[in-house]
Image (cartoon, grey):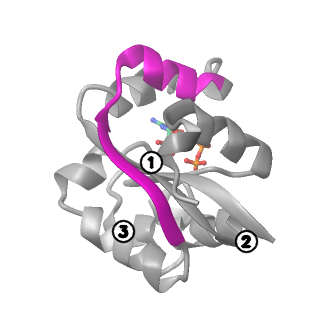
C-alpha cells in the first residue's frame, strides 16, 4: 500500500553533513521525497512532537537535543514507506542496529541517533501534519 511517513535528519545528522547521504539512501530504496525543509525547532515544538515520551526520563534531554540546531524534515512516499524507512534507519540504539543501516553507520549515542521515522500510519499522519500543510506536499 502506498503510504507517507515523516522522516527527520536530526541536528547531529545535519551537523555531520549527512543530508545528502540520508537522501541518497531514501531514493535508492525507491521512496520519493514529496516535501522537504530545513527548520530549527523550538523547545515547545520538540516537546509537542515527542509528547508520547513525556513521562520518560530522557524527555527533557531529547527535546533539548532536537531544538536549537537545524534539522531536515521530509515527507517520504511509496509502497510500505513506513516500514521501509524504519528498516533503513535501524534500531533506536545504534549498537543494536543492523549493519548497513543509517544509525549503525553514523550514530554515536542512543539519543543522538541521526534520524527519525514515524513508526505507524497513525503516528505518520500526526507527524506529517505537525510540520507540513497540504500545500507543501507534492502530489
Ligand atoms: P525511535 O522511534 O527509534 O526514534 O525511538 P523512540 O520513539 O523510542 O525514541 C524517540 C527518541 O528518543 C530516540 O530516537 C532517541 O533520540 C531518544 N531516546 C530513546 N530512548 C532513549 C534513551 O534511553 N535515552 C536517551 N537519552 N534518549 C533516548
Residue 133 versus residue 56: which sits nearer the camera? Answer: 133
Assess disc 2: are there few (<14), some (14-19) or many (≥20) residues with their C-alpha within 10 Å of its C-alpha.
some
Judge left or right: residue 128 versus residue 34.
right
In the rendered structure, does residue 101 fall within the stretch colored magenta?
A: no
In the rendered structure, does residue 43 fall within the stretch colored magenta?
A: yes
Q: Position of residue 58 (x, y in %)?
A: 50, 27
What residue do we see at 29% from left, 54% from top?
13
Give the mark nearest the N terminus, 2 or 1.
Answer: 2
Name the residue that disc number 2 marks: 80
- Label at residue 22: 3
Helix, strand or loop at label 1? It is: loop
Helix, strand or loop at label 2? It is: loop
**What are the residue bounds of the magenta stretch?**
32-51
Helix, strand or loop at label 3? It is: helix
Quarter assignment of residue 80: bottom right
Label 1 C-beta lies within 8 Å of the nearest ligand 1 atom:
yes
Residue 89 versus residue 9: which sits nearer the camera? Answer: 9
Amino acid at each position: 500500500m502506498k503510504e507517507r511517513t515523516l522522516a527527520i535528519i536530526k541536528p547531529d545528522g545535519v551537523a555531520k553533513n549527512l543530508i545528502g547521504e540520508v537522501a541518497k539512501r531514501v531514493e535508492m530504496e525507491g521512496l520519493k521525497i514529496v516535501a522537504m525543509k530545513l527548520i530549527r525547532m523550538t523547545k515547545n515544538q520538540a516537546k509537542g512532537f515527542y509528547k508520547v515520551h513525556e513521562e520518560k526520563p530522557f524527555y527533557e534531554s531529547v527535546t533539548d537535543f532536537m531544538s536549537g540546531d537545524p534539522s531536515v524534515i521530509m515527507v517520504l512516499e511509496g509502497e510500505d514507506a513506513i516500514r521501509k524507512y524504519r528498516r533503513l534507519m535501524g534500531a533506536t540504539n545504534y549498537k543494536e542496529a543492523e549493519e548497513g543501516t543509517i544509525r549503525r553507520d553514523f550514530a554515536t549515542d542512543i539519543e543522538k541517533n541521526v534520524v527519525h521515522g514515524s513508526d505507524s500510519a497513525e503516528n505518520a499522519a500526526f507527524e506529517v501534519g505537525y510540520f507540513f500543510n497540504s500545500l507543501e506536499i507534492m502530489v
